[in-house]
Image: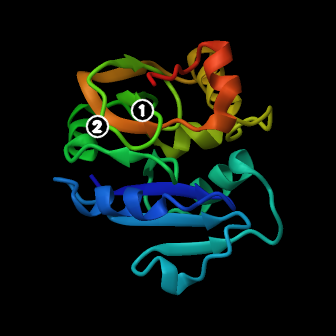
Amino acid sequence: MKISVIVPVGPEGSYLPDLMQSLREQTLQADEVVIVDDAAGLTPDDVPGCTYYRNPWRLGEVSSRNIGIAIARNDWVFQAAHDDMLYPDCLRRCAEVATDEAGYYYTILALGRSGEPVTEYQGTVGAHALFHRRTWARLGGYPLCGALGLADIGMIDLWMTHGGPVYRVGDDPLYWHRTHEYNGLQAATGVMRDLN
C-alpha cells in the first residue's frame, strides 16, 4: 500500500521537525509527504523530499487539508498535524488493517502538553487517520465548519452518516498529540483533554 501523509503547516509550525523525524522512523515508510504551507513561511528547501504546496494566502487548516489530499499522488492518505508525532509502527499498523476503501482508520493517541510522553491515552477520532481519497471526495472533502478540531468531528459525522465504517486501529497509542495553551476549545468540549 502506498500512503501519502498530509501535513498542513500554519504560522505556528515550529514543531514540524519533530513530526518529520517521526515520519523518518516509521517501520512502513510513507510513499509521499505533502506539506501544505498555510502562511508558515517555509520554502521547499525546508522540507526536502516532500511534495510542497504554498497556499496563496492563509486559508486555515481545514482548507489546507482539503488541498493536500487533492494534490496527493496516492489514493490512501494519512492526515497528520504539524506539531504531533507518530509512533514508529503507526503507518504499518494502519495499513495492515485498511482493507475497506470506504473505511476510516483512526489511531489511539497519547496526549501531553510540552513534549513529555504520557502513559495515559484516549481514543479520539481526529487528525490522525488513514482513509481512501475516493470516499473523501465522495463526501465533498472536509466541511469548512471551524477550527481546532471541529472540522475533524464534522468529517467523522459525514463519514458515519454517508461514508463507510469507522475503525479504531489497535488499543495502544500510535499517534502522539501535542496540546497547547491556545487549544482550550478542544479541552473544553471534551474532544481532547490535557494531561498536565
Whole-percent x, y for residue 155 in the image? 64, 29
The mark total stands at: 2
Circle 2: element type = helix
Q: Is 69 situated above or below 120? A: below
Q: Is residue 27 left or right of residue 4?
A: left
Residue at image position (50%, 22%) is: 164
Q: Nearer the viewer, residue 68 or 176?
A: 176
Q: Is 60 situated above or below 191? A: below
Whole-percent x, y for residue 12 in the image? 64, 57
Distance (Cα) linking label 2 and label 1: 22 Å
Residue at image position (47%, 35%) is: 113
Question: If you read the primary sequence from the N terminus, does the residue marked by circle 2 or circle 1 appear first?
Answer: 2
Which residue is labeled 2 in the image? 94
Coloring applied to the structure: rainbow
- Amino acid at the residue labelled 2: Cys
- Amino acid at the residue labelled 1: Gly
* Residue at the limit of the structure toward the right, as seen here: 57
Circle 1: element type = strand
Viewer-side label of 2, 1: 1
Q: Is residue 135 left or right of residue 189?
A: left
* Residue at the limit of the structure toward the left, as seen here: 27
Whole-percent x, y for residue 70 in the image? 61, 57
For the C terminus, the image quarter is top left
Whole-percent x, y for residue 162 in the image? 63, 20
Residue at image position (42%, 81%) is: 48
Q: Is residue 73 left or right of residue 98?
A: right
Q: Is 62 situated above or below 103? A: below
Which residue is labeled 1 in the image? 112
Q: Is 73 situated above or below 166? A: below
Q: Is residue 142 visible?
A: yes
Count residues near mark 2 (Cα–Cα under 10 Å), then give few for <14, some for 14-19, many for 20+: many
